[in-house]
Amino acid sequence: MKNPHYLLIAVVVCLAHTANSQSTFENGYVVLTNGDTLRGAINNRDWKTNPKSIEFRSASGDLFNYTPAEITRFYLEKSNENFRAVSMIIDKSPTEADHVTEESHLLSAQETLFLRVLVNGPIALLHSFDFKDHFYFEKGGEVTELLHQARLVRGKNPYDSEAGVHTQRQNSDYRTTGDKLLLKRNEKYKFQLINAFEDCKTLLPDLQRLTFEEKALRKVFLGYYKCKSISTEKQKDYSSYKTQIGIVAGLTQTRTNVSAEETTNKHLNGKSVKSMLPSFGIQLTATAPRNRGRLAFHTDLLFQQYEVTSTNEVRNSAYRTVYVNTYNFSDLTLNVGGRYYFANSTIRPFGDIGATGVFSVKREAYTTDNKIRLNEAQPYESYHEDIATRPYQIGIWLGAGVTYEKFALEARLSSTNGWSDVPAIAVSVNRASLLFSYRIF
């Protein structure tokens, strides 16, 4: 391909057209503070934290921005996501041992925000996230935060306790200031729910060992509805894996390194000329629910190709021999690995690492020997010699990039054990790629 950039431009144009044609708006409704329901479309920004405002498009096409102070709830039909607006005092105390102090449990702030509905019914389970997870329950129209706090206390008895409070002995994980400091964890949420579900005694054992996690809380709320034979609306399950499929395109620079042990193959030694050609394909990312969706399984299948050459010259008293080594490959590259997101925000930097497998659908590796007399410019003899190749390669890859809504940009490096099928000829193929991707769904 004489000018690969034209193909890349065409692919990027197709991606941009796809992005424009697939709006992030989806059907839904908002409920105003006066009780009126407005149907239209809501811009689904795939929020990692609770939205501060939403963009609403009415049936007539007018755009409005609504904050939690202006509406009481909104609903996204396709995503099956339900949000409630509240204004209340939120617990702001840290729970990580390194940030807990003797008075940190007193931290709180008045906030007006949208809460994500996890379980909808007579007693609803709601959620928000800032620097930690917050869970709430709504009963009789009143929203109450479920409290899970920690603080450092001074005391002689490491086993002293009060209702819902567990005390741990001081160890190397906790700071000291001369006197003995103990880390107390207040699991008040258990007793809040025991009171809320007091009319279902069979839940008591589950409530007593309940952990402060979405999956466990969702299970106990649904258990209450089953106990009372109450039907509930099915909500989106944020505690399950989230799978995303997309398309990817970019430019890949390829270089081969050849090392031949035998004298007859020494002309193959050295680095090849770099090749820059387009790459494109499909990708799949499955995000784990734990750790706020920061850890994910990522795989992509790319079509990549390269045509590179290297030149070596050998001289004697009568003539010189110019060896032109040509490597022309078209590959299907499967990358499988892990991805870690470093932030939960609209712009999310990430890092990748994994294994790569390459299957070559086109394989050409050969040497042209040109013998040229010292006083002449043109060769008087020319030979063509094929190099034995294999159709598969394995290796490793790593990358770093950033996502924004449905788009991602990534810089990636990979290295494989090469295509040589001759034990005496060692080959490595090194690639550097700049990839642009768009999530379809």
Image (cartoon, helix red, strand yellow):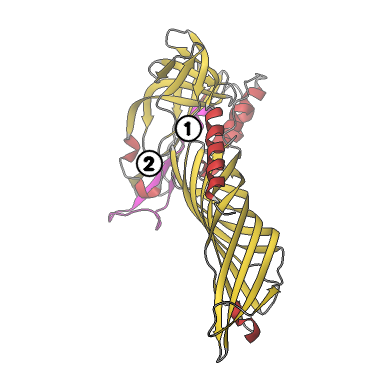
Foreground of the two, 195 or 293: 293
Q: Quadrant of residue 18?
A: top right
Is residue 226 visible to us here?
yes
Instruction: Identify the disc placed on residue 214.
Output: none
Query: For residue 90, which quarter of the picture?
Result: top left
Decide which of 39, 119 is in the foreground and name it.
39
Percent across and percent down for residue 66 are 41, 19
- In magenta stretch: residue 418: no
Establish if 82 lies above or below 148. Answer: above
Quadrant, the N terminus: bottom right
Q: Secondary structure at mark 1?
A: loop
From the top left corner, tell me how far across and down residue 321 is, in percent: 59, 82
Residue drawn 60% across and 61% down?
Answer: 307
Q: Relative to the observer, which residue lies in front, 109 or 328?
A: 328
Kind of residue at badge 2: Pro
Residue 200 relative to residue 190: left or right: right
Which residue is pictured at 44% across the width and 37% down the height?
346
Q: Which residues are magenta?
A: 167-193
* Residue 41 locus on image (x, y percent): 52, 19
Q: Secondary structure at mark 2?
A: loop
Residue 47 bears which disc, if any? 1
Graded by Cα atoms within 10 Å as few (under 14), some (14 to 19) or many (20 or more), the crowding at tag 2 reads some
The residue type indicated by label 1 comes to Trp
